Amino acid sequence: MKPSSSSVSAAVVVALVVVAAASVAVVEVAEAAPSPLCNPTLLTPCAGPVLFGGPVPAVCCAQLRAQASCLCSYARSPNYGAYIRSPNAARLFAVCRLPMPRCS
């Protein structure tokens, strides 16, 4: 049995509504997403110096500079705060010639 033109038209309308709703959802998620600059995984070159001391790689300093606006949110995070406030982190900021974040 061949579908009627009205059922095909209804299916097209439903498909368009679904696509439109999905587009709105994607835009809302994109607007609510954090800044792409705030990505703590990019600070992994700093992990060794923060945890164990030792030399600070240039890429660590570059990432700290790139994410300077994110450091207070990291300091307030239960996952990252202890690293930002550690004595080795203070040394790391000094080596990178960056001010220690002053977060309220």
Image: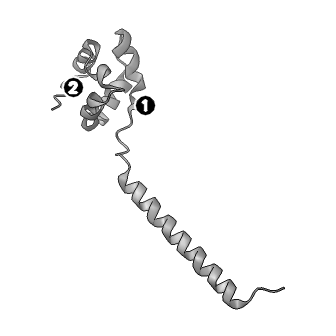
**Colour pattern:** one colour
Res. 3 image quadrant: bottom right
Q: Nearer the viewer, residue 56 or 24?
A: 24
Res. 48 image quadrant: top left
Q: Nearer the viewer, residue 44 or 102?
A: 102
Amino acid type, mark 2:
Leu
Q: Is residue 72 above or below residue 95?
A: below
Mark nearer the N terminus (1 vs 2): 1
Q: Residue furthest bottom?
A: 5
* Left or right side of 14 for 92: left
Tag 2 residue: 98
Q: Residue at x 32, y 20 (%)?
A: 83
| SS assignment at label 2 | loop
**Residue 57 x/y as whole percent:** 37, 19
* Alpha-carbon span between mark 1 and mark 2: 20 Å
Q: Residue at x 51, y 65 (%)?
A: 22
Nearer to us of marks 1 and 2 is 1
Q: Nearer the viewer, residue 94 or 20?
A: 20
Q: Nearer the viewer, residue 68 or 23?
A: 23
Res. 28 image quadrant: bottom left
The quadrant in which the C terminus is found is: top left
Tag 1 residue: 41
Amino acid type, mark 1:
Thr
Q: Is residue 86 above or below residue 20?
A: above
Q: Residue at x 63, y 83 (%)?
A: 10
